Image: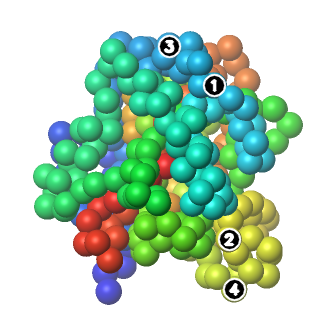
Amino acid sequence: MTQMRHRLIETTLDDLKSEMGGLLRGEVAAVLVRNSLSESACDRVFQNFASSAGVYERSDGVSGKMVGTNAFLKSAHDVVDDYARNNGFAELLFHGATNLYRHLFDSVEEAGFRFRHAYIDGVPAPTHRATVWTDSGKDRLALRAHTDWPQVRHSGMEYSDVEHPVAVNFYPRHPAPGSSFVRLYDFVPAGDWLETRGILKSGYPICLDELEGIDYIDVHPVAGDTLLFAASKVHAVFQANQGADDVRLNINGFIGLSRASNKVLAWA
């Protein structure tokens, strides 16, 4: 078995296809795509978010405003209802701008994989949703440490057989360099480790104190970048400095190679 390289690789959108296979096979920990969309395109996406009729407050313990679906620990029936209400607003985020996800899926196919949306009860899953996190200033973290594999494995959805889920995070807005970052730990917790902490199905949250001594990568994106990383590894987002320009708009979803379908599936 090839061991995952726990390091950050930087590349461009045109060259992302060269790293896609390693990400999907669980051999690469993180890839940062610099300048994946232009400044003007990022501005348009941010304006679309700010003016969207689909903005709502997150209700899953993460502080922030959201556009698009939130499938966290929902049944297939409830997920489909959520898609129907919210996914059209997420698609409109790229109105008047280049849709980054079309480029991303081109990279998947150029790397030699077959791609499609995951299906939930016959309905194609969204590719992305968006959040502006509202850091409170009372905590070091905007998003507490967690692993995403339990939400994938225990979802009951078509993508539940994906062994190496890849998180895709595009940042049309991001705090100034150095004021906020993603920390990716070299740690995939086992099921029994999660079960003893009562988070077997969610993988969230994990106390930072329990991660002392574990190797990690700190990733510092800037506006326009896209970060793809091994979502099974524990990760956290450290909050910004609370300055006027410290807005973080994160558009995210997941991709992963399904053994059953032998295709790369996308979902949010």
Q: Earlier in the sequence, mark 4 or mark 1?
A: 1
Query: Residue shown at 39%/50% (left/top)?
Result: 124
Residue assigned mark 1: 55
The secondary element bearing badge 4 is classed as helix
Within-10-Å neighbours for mark 4: few <14, some 14–19, many 20+: few
Kind of residue at disc 3: Gln
Query: Residue shown at 54%/50% (left/top)?
Result: 80
The secondary element bearing badge 3 is classed as helix
Kind of residue at disc 1: Val
- Nearer to us: label 4 or label 3: 3
Residue assigned mark 2: 201
Q: Earlier in the sequence, mark 3 or mark 2?
A: 3
Residue assigned mark 4: 192
Report the side of 127 relative to 79 (left or right).
Answer: left
Give the CA separation, mark 4 to mark 1: 37 Å
Colour approach in the figure? rainbow
Report the side of 165 relative to 97 (left or right).
Answer: right
Q: Which of marks 1 and 2 is nearer the N terminus?
A: 1
Within-10-Å neighbours for mark 3: few <14, some 14–19, many 20+: few
236 or 254: nearer the viewer: 254
Kind of residue at disc 2: Lys
x, y (%) of residue 15?
18, 45
Q: Which of marks 3 and 1 is nearer the N terminus?
A: 3
Kindly check if marks 2 and 4 are in contact, taking CB atoms under 8 A apart as contact. Answer: no
Kind of residue at disc 4: Asp
On residue 136, the disc is none
Q: Is residue 10 above or below residue 235?
A: above
Give the CA separation, mark 1 to mark 2: 27 Å
Residue assigned mark 3: 47
Q: Is residue 202 above or below residue 226?
A: below
